[in-house]
Structures are given as structure tokens and as C-alpha cells.
Amino acid sequence: MIKQVQNGNQPIVGRLAPSPTGALHLGNARSFLLAWLSVRSRNGRLIVRMEDLDHPKVKPWAATAALDDLRWLGLDWDAGPDTDASKYIQSNRRAIYGKYLEQLLDKGLVYPCVCSRNEIENVQSAPHREDQRLIYNGTCRGRFSNWDSATAMLPDGRLPVWRFKLEKQGRSCFVDAIRGECEADYQADIGDFALARDPLGAGYTLAHVVDDYLMGVTEVLRGDDLLEATHSHIVLQQALGFPTPQYVHVPLVVAEDGRRLAKRHGDTRIAMLREKGFTPPQVIGILAWWCGWAEFGEELMPEDLLARFDLAIFIREQAVLTPQVKEYFKL
């Protein structure tokens, strides 16, 4: 069982980590509200970190818009891009990630991989969904012993992927504050996972694990779409000698068809609700209703929920964009 950070008398440190790939919607807002409540209800410290390393999808306007939406909702933080852009915007920290990639290279724990998703999929025994995690079979292990992977590029212009060489056998296990004990087989369920495509190691997996450590994060509350990936994050923490924070994976907000919120389900962007004339208490009230802490239509601000925040009575099923909610927001 993974030993997670024990806070004792140390303050809780949490984080909000928006990715500027689009506008915040009701689902994002609910997760951020929960993270805020979890930290503020215990007088902890909260940071905002802009995770902008997903280059093809990053929108130039989205980072500022995300901070504006968070402020409008009534969420505050103790440090973030507005106080120190060099520290809290990941694209400004590539050299830092490169140093930790070098540590992993020195330990023989990472290697470059040139396999495409289709090539990996073709060696699997069953078809995979587009968003499904593939378990890599290790084709490129030892393939490029003298290869300059920092400058090499595939013929179609793609950079190679850095993969973690996972040689552990047995099962990974950690305790999630909502899901309880979560297990995965190192080889069958995790495998040699991707760290980054950037030559300096500036990719989501490595960057956010490094940043959580350097920023002293003790609790990570996020959507449960990242629950399975948490095992690889913990593997990386162990390889780098980092403590494991407490994980809290909350169910997503989905449409009635069970899918993630999308344009076909109505415009649930916070910015659009603002333009329509809805107020922060109206939005926060619905987010709280989804959690089981408010009556439908009750108008609240985040601080009104501090006394109600309790994961023991939190609704643990997915929150659904029901016709009642759509009618409320005129979607």
C-alpha cells in the first residue's frame, strides 16, 4: 500500500490546475469548487498552476479566461500565474523538467519511443476506443542505444515519445479519499507509460508530478477520468523519491447519454452563463446541488459551503446534466 503524505500539523496544500485548451464549463467548475472547498475548509494553502503543455490544443486566450472565470465564481488562491508567471505557468518551466528527465535517464528508467498509436493498437488483441489507455509492449526498449533523441524527429515531423521503463512486478495500490483502495497490475494495466514528447521532458505526466513535489502539494483533487493514470504518477513519484499526495478523484459531470459535456449537449461554458446574466450564486448553487449539499435552485457562494463540505455525504455517482438543469440555465 502506498504511503501518502501525512500532514500532521503541516498545512494542507492543494492546487487548481486548469489547462488552457478551451473555456471552463460546469464540469470543470465543479471540480475546482470541490478542490477549493477541501483546502479552504481546513485553512490550507491553494495554488493555481496553468498546465499549458498540450501545444496543439492550447488557445492563446484560454489562460486569462480561466482565471477570470474562477474569480467570477468566487474562488481565490494564494499563488498563481497572476503572482508569479515564471513559477505557475508550466511552459515557463521546461528547463526544470529537463533536469528531472536527466535523472531518470541516468538511472536507465526512460527511453525514446517512435511507435505511433496505430502501431501500438495493432499489437493489441482487442479494439480500443480513441480515449482508451493503451498498454505499451516495449518495442522500443533498447532500440536506440546511441540515438540523439533530443534532436531526432520522425519523417512526418513527429518527435519521439519519452517512455518510463517499468520493470516492477505485482500490483500498485493506493487509497483514494473517495474510491478507497485502488489497485492495478504493473505490467498488465500500466506498462511502459509515456512521459513526454518534448525533448526536455515537458509533458503532462512528468511536469505535473515534478510541480506537485516542488510546490509542496499534499492533496490532489481532480476528476476521476485520471484515476487509472494515477498509478503511473505514483510510479514516477517513487522513481524520483517524491512523497505521494492524498488523491481525491471525484465523478465527472456528464450529459444524459453518459458522455462528457460537449457542444451537442448545450453551451455549458461559464463565460456563456455570465453573458446570459446568470450570477455566481446561481451557478455555485447548482454545483452544490450536484454534490448533495444544497436544494435545487438554492443560491450560494463558495464560502457558504465551507460548513457543508463533507466527502462522507458527497454524492459519489456522476453528476448529470438533466433536463431540469438545462431548463434552469436555458441551455
Image (cartoon, rainbow, N blue to C red):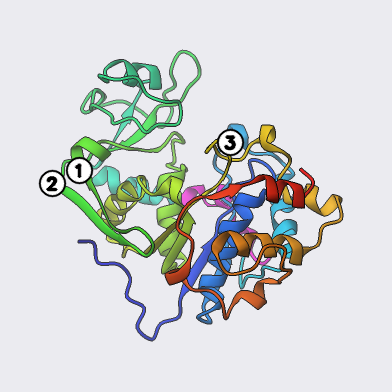
- 3D distance between C-alphas at marks 3 and 2: 35 Å
Label 1: which residue? 185
Q: Is residue 259 above or below residue 235?
A: above
Three-letter code, disc 1 = Asp
Give the secondary structure at mark 1. strand
Q: Is residue 222 above or below residue 119?
A: below
Magenta segment range? Answer: 81-96
Left or right: 255 in relation to 219: right
Q: Position of residue 152 (x, y in %)?
A: 41, 24
Mark 2 neighbour density, 10 Å: few (under 14) some (14–19) many (20 or more):
few
Between disc 3 and disc 2, the foreground one is 2
Considering the image in quadrants, where does the C terminus appear? top right
Tag 3 and tag 2, C-beta contact below 8 Å: no
Considering the image in quadrants, where does the N terminus appear? bottom left
320 vs 80, nearest the viewer:
320
Q: Position of residue 269 (x, y in %)?
A: 72, 46
- 3D distance between C-alphas at marks 3 and 1: 31 Å
Left or right: 78 in relation to 245: right
Q: Is residue 93 magenta?
A: yes
Three-letter code, disc 3 = His
Q: Which mark is residue 170?
A: 2
Q: Is residue 169 above or below residue 296?
A: above
- Magenta span main SS: helix
94 vs 224, nearest the viewer:
224
